[in-house]
Amino acid sequence: MDIQEVIRLLRSGASDREIVPLVRLNRRTVVRYRRWAQEHGVLEGPLLSARALEEKLTATLPAARPPQQCSSVDAYRAEIAAWRTQGLEIAAIRGRLEELHGAPISYSAVWRLARGLAPARPPEAFVRVEVPPGTEGQVDFGYAGRTADPATGLLRKTWVFVLVLSWSRHLYAELVFDQRVETWLLCHRHAFEAFGGVPERIVLDNLKAAILRASVHDPAVQRAYRECALHYGFRIDPNPPRQPHLKGKVESGVHYVKRNFLAGREGERCDELNRKLGLWTRHVAGQRVHGTTKDRPYERFQAVEQAALLPLPPTPYDLASWKQVILHRDCYVVFEGAYYSAPYRLVGQRLWIRAGTRTVELFTADHALVATHDRAPRPGLRQTLLAHLPPHKVPGLVASRETCRTQAASIGPATTALVAELLEHRPEDRLKVAQRVLGLAAQVGDGRLEQACARALHYGTPDYPTLKRILAARLDQAPLGAPAPAPRPTGFRFARQASEFVAGLWAGTRGEQP
C-alpha cells in the first residue's frame, strides 16, 4: 500500500523531494520505484490495485535480501545434524564439539544452526471451546510455595486448589497442605457451598486423588470421588493423559492466583492467607475485566450462571475415602493406624473399607456390607464387635473376676462359693480355672453344676478335676454322706527343742552320756 501511494504521487507529478516526507521512505527507495514504474508503464493508464501491484512487483522486482552470514559452526553441520537425530541436547552437542575439535564453541551458534536443521512445522490450529452457563467447572492444584502451619508454626509445602466456572470465569481458591483424597473432596464441598450450586460437569487432570488409571477411552475413577459425584450430581470428565491445554481456563486461573495473590506472601500463616484469599477472589479477581469475556466474572456469575447451577443436596457429602485392605488372622483390618474387626470367616480375604468422618464400613468384593464401626479418634485404638470373633475364643477374651462372680451367682450359692474360693486363692491366679468350672454349665446344665459344686465343697475338694469326676460318675445326684475329715498337715514339726540335740551332740564329743 505504501508503494501504491508512491505511484499515485508520481502520477500526480510530485517530485522525489516532496514524496519522501509524505510516505516516510528513503529518497533512494523513491528513486528506485520511480525507475521501476517508468520501465513497466505503471505511471500511465488506470492505477493498479494493491493486489495487482503486489503480483507485478513480485514478478519483476525481487525483494533485496540481506547478505547471508556464515555460522561459526557451519563446518560441523553434519555432526550436529547426526547428534540431533540421536536426540542429544544443545549443551551436550556443544560439549562433544569442544571435546573432539579442541576449540571453544558458542552455544548460541549451535542452537541457531540446530534450529535451522529442524523441519519447519505448520502451526497447529486450535478451536476455542465455550460452554453454556452452569454446565462446566474446571479444577486443578498448583504449587503455592511454603506457608506457616497454624498448629506448629513450621513452614510446609502448600498447594492451591482452584475451581473455575467455565462460562463466567468466576473462581474458588483454597490453600491446603496435601493432595490426599480427603482434602480433594473437602475442597470440592467448600467450592460448591461458596458457589451455592454445582456445575453439571467437572473437568480435571489425572491426579491420583481422583483418577486411579488415566486413559483416553476408559479412565478408572477413584471410588470416593465417584461417590462424591453421585451425591452432588455432577459428571466427572478427566482429560486424556498429558493434555493439560484441554482445561486451559483453570490452568490460567491457577497462574493468575499465583502471580497476583500468592506472589511475595511465602512464609505467612496458611489460615490467614485463606481468609484473605476468600475476599480476594470476590473483590479483586471477581471484579477484574476478564481478558476473554471482557466482563467482570463475579457480576457475570451473579447475573446468569449462579441460577443455572445444580442445587446443593439437603446434606453435605460425608467425606469418605475408600481403600482395599486384608483381614488379618486376628480378625482386624488396619486403616490409618487403627484396627477394625470383621467376621472371622473372611480372614485372609481382601475387603473394601469406606472411612467416613464418623463411621467406618467394611464391604466384601461383591459389595456386601459386613461390618460398621465408629471411626477411631486416633491411631492405635481397636474397634471390636464380639460377634466377629471365633465363638470359642470370646469367653476367654471378655472374662474377668466380676463377670465370673456374676455368672456364678446366676447358677446358685454353691457355685458362687466355689468360684469365689478359686478367685481368692493365693499366690497362684486361678481365674482360668474358674472360667473352666463355669464352662461346665454349658455341657451339663446349671442344676447339675450347682449340685456338683455343693458335693465338692461338702467333701472339701473344690477343684476342677474333682468336679469333672463327680459329673462323669453322676455322683452329683447321689445323697451327701459325712463330710470328709480335716486334712492332716503334710509339713514336718519338731517334738523337742533343737537346743536338746545340740547339747547331746556336745556331750558325745566329750565322752559323756547324753
Image (cartoon, helix red, strand yellow):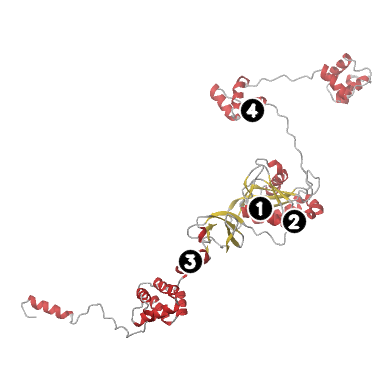
Q: Nearer the viewer, residue 281 or 383?
A: 383
The reply to whether residue 511 is visible in this rendering is yes
Question: Where in the figure is residue 493, as x and y percent of width and height?
Answer: 22, 79
- What residue would you read off at disc 3? 391
Disc 3 secondary structure class: helix
Q: Residue drawn at (8%, 75%), measured in percent from left and top?
A: 509
Task: Please name the residue that numbered disc 4 is placed on.
Answer: 111
Establish if 423 lies above or below 4.
Answer: below
Choose top left, top right, bottom left or bottom right for residue 228.
bottom right
Q: Nearer the viewer, mark 2 or mark 4?
A: 2
Horizontal placement of 418 versus 217: left or right? left
Instruction: Give the Cα separation between the discs numbered 4 and 1.
Output: 49 Å
| Residue on which disc 2 sits | 197
- Is residue 477 or residue 459 the one in the foreground? 477
Q: Quadrant of residue 474?
A: bottom left
Going by the numbered disc 2, the residue's amino acid type is Gly
Residue hosting label 1: 226
Identify the residue shown where x is 47% and y is 79%.
410
Count residues near mark 1 (Cα–Cα under 10 Å), then give few for <14, some for 14-19, many for 20+: some
Label 2 neighbourhood size at 10 Å, few (<14), some (14-19), many (20+)?
Answer: many
